[in-house]
Amino acid sequence: MLNSIKVLFLVSALIIAQIGFGQDQPKIDSLFQVLRTSKQDTNKVLLLYNLSREFFNSDIDRAEKYSNRALFLSERLGYKKGIAMSYNNLGIINYYNAVYNVALTYHDRSLEIMSEIGNRKGMAGSFNNKGAVYTQQGEYALAIEQYLNSIRLLEEVDDNEGVGKSYNNIGLVYYLQGNYDQAEDYYSKALEILKPFNKQGVISDIMNNLGIISFEKGQYEESLEYHFKSLDGREGTGNQRGMATSYTNIGDVYAAKEVIEKAMEYQKKALEIQEELGDRKGMISSIQGLARVQSLSGNSDQALDYMKDVITISSEIGAKKELRDAYNEISEIYIRQGDFAKALNYKTRYAEMKDTLFSEQTKEIATNLEAKFESENKSKEIEILKRENEIQELQLGRNRILIISFTVGLVLALISVVLYARTNRDRKKAFDLLQKQNENIKKQKEEKEVLLKEIHHRVKNNLQVINSLIRLQCAYTDDQEALDLFDECQNRIISMALIHEKMYEAHDLSNINIQEYIAELSQNLLRSYRLNKQVELYIDVSVKTLTLDTLIPLGLLLNELISNSLKHAFKDDAEEGVISVKLDRDPVSGKFVMEIGDNGIGLPEDFTFNSAQTLGIELVVTLSSQLDGTIERMDKPGSYFKIEFVGLEKERADIKLAMQNDVS
C-alpha cells in the first residue's frame, strides 16, 4: 500500500462542486473590475465568494481573505445563504491547511444555516465536506455516514453529478481500509456517472484514484497510464495542487519500479509546489516518497531524516494514517540497518495506530450504515409503487364522491386564497413602501455621516495649515511680545483643531469622549509652555456627551484658563504645581458646572472680571456668555473659577434627550 494519501476527495464549494481548478487570471481581473464599482449588496457577496474560489489552489491566504470579506458583508446584509456559503469556503480552506477541527466547525455552521433556509444541495455539500474531514482524521464510520447523508439529499434533488462525486469519496474510504476491489468499483461508478458532465477536473481526480488502485495491485504500467492522464487534465486546468499530487504518485510508481532518477525528479517537483502552496498534508506525501527513494538507493540515514520530518508534520496536523504509515516505514528502515530494538519500538507504535484506525467496530458500523441506506431506498421505491397502484385503482373505480369532494375543497381553497390575497395586498404594499423608505433613510444617514466626517477632517487640516503659517511667520520676528501673542493664537487654533479631529475619529458624531479631549488639550498646552517644573493634571469629567456648538467655545475657554495658570501661577521656586478640571451636571437645574484652577500664587485680592484688561480674560467672559452661563472666582487657595452654563444643547433635541436619559 502507498504510505501517503494521494487519493483525491471531491469537496464541495456550495453544491457538490470540484474546486481543484487553477487560477484563471483573466477571470480574476474581470471579477476585480466589477468589484471596484459594485454596491454593498448580495451581488458583491457572490463576487467575493467567487474570488475566494479562484484563489484556492494558487494563494490560500487570499482565498481566506475574500471568504472572510464575503462572510462579513453577508452578516451585515442578513444574507443567510451568503453566510452559509462563506462558512463552507472557510471550512474547505482549513481542510487544505490541515486544521481539521476548525474545518468541521465551519461546515457544521454552514449545514445549520442551509437546513434553516431549506437549501438541500447546500446541505449535501456540507455533509460531503464533513465526510472528507472525518476521512483525513481516520474517523471512517463518521465519514461514510456523512457521504450517505449527502447522497440521500442529492438523489432527492436529481443531482447526479453530486452523487458521482460522493461515490468517489466512498471509494476512498474503502481504499483506506484496504478493500481495493470495492474501492475500484465505487471509483468506476463515479467515473461512469460523471463522464457525461465533461468536468475535466473531476475526471482527472478519479483517474488519479484509479491509478492508486492499480499501483496497490502491482499493475505499475496501468498505474502510470492513469496518472499521466490525470496529470494532463490538471495541467490543462492549471490545478497546481492536483499537479503536485500527480507528481507524487508518479514518483512512487517509478520508485516501485526502481527507476531512481525519475522517482527523485517527480517527488522534488511535487514538494516544490506543496511548499509554495503551504500544503502540509501534501508535503507529507512528497517527503515520504523521497524517503523511499533514498532507502532504495541505500541512503538509510537520509531516509530516516525524511521520515522523522513526516512524523513531526503528521503529529502537528493530526493526520493519523500518515503517522501510522511513518512508524511502519521507520521500522522497516531500522530492520535493514540491523537495529532490531528500534525497529521493534516503531513496529509496536504502528500496530497500535493500525488497531485504532481499522477496528472491526468501524468496519461493522460502516457496513450497517450502507445497508441501512440501501434499505431505505428500497422502502421508498416500494412506497412509490404502492401509491401508483392506489391512484390507478381510484381512476378505474371513478370514485365520484372523492372527485366532487376534492373539487369543492379546491374551490373553497381558491376562494380563501383570493380573499386572503385581497386582504393582504394593500398591507404588503404599505410594508414594502415603508421598508424602502427606511432603507433610503438609512442610506442617506450613512452618506451624511461620511460627509460630516470629511468636513471635520478638512476643517482640522485647514486649521493646521493656519497654525503652520503662524509658525512660519514667527521666524521673521525677534519681538518676544509678538512671539508670545503668536503662541497664544496657535494654542487657540490647536484647541479648535483638536475638536474637529475628535469629531472625525468618532464612530458617532454626537458622542465624543469629553474627558479624553480635555486631557489631550491640557497635555498639548503643557508641552507648549515647557515649564521647568513638574505640573500635575487632575481631570474629573462625568459628562459623556456635548454638541459641537458647545464644545468649541468650551474648548477655547479651557485653553484660556489653563494657559493663564501655566503662564502666571507657578514660580520657579514653588513646590509641585497642580491644575485641576472638573466638569459635572447639576441633576436639579440641568446646568453644566465646571470648576477649573491651580494651586499657584493666586490672583490679586481686588481682582474682578470687569477690571481685567487682558484679551484672555475678555475671551473668558465672552465665551462664558456665549455658553449662556456665568463665571465667578472661587474662595480657595490659588486661582479657581466656577462656570455654570446651559450650553447650546437645547438646539439639538436628540442630544438633549440623550443627556436627560444619562442624568436619570
Image: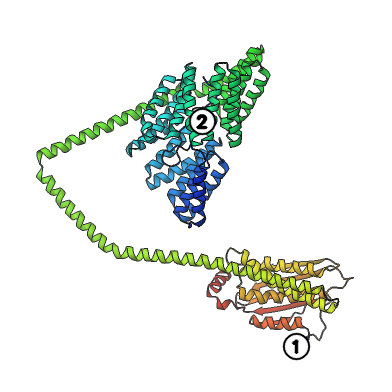
Relative height, residue 79 to residue 237 (above, below)? below
Mark 2 belongs to which amino acid?
A: Gln
Q: Are marks 1 and 2 in contact (CB under 8 Å)?
A: no
Res. 658 in view: yes
Residue 304 horizontal/vertical position (percent)? 65, 21
Give the left or right position of residue 377, taking residue 337 as reference: left
Residue 69 horizontal/vertical position (percent)? 53, 50
> Which one is in front, 469 or 606?
469
* Quarter holding residue 603: bottom right
The residue drawn where x is 47% and y is 38% is 19
Mark 1 burial class by Cα count in 10 Å: few <14, some 14-19, many 20+: few
Give the left or right position of residue 315, taking residue 135 as reference: right
Residue 176 horizontal/vertical position (percent)? 48, 24
Mark 1 belongs to which amino acid?
A: Asn
Secondary element type, mark 1:
loop
Residue 471 horizontal/vertical position (percent)? 77, 72
Q: Quadrant of the C terminus?
A: bottom right
The residue drawn where x is 64% and y is 20% is 303
* Quarter holding residue 534: bottom right
* Quarter holding residue 331: top right
Query: What whole-number distance in Å separates the C-alpha atoms at marks 1 and 2?
Result: 86 Å
Relative height, residue 610 to residue 299 (above, below)? below
The label number, if any, that marks residue 610 in the structure image: 1
The label number, if any, that marks residue 177 in the structure image: none
Relative height, residue 434 to residue 339 (above, below)? below
- Per the image, the residue denoted by label 2 is 136
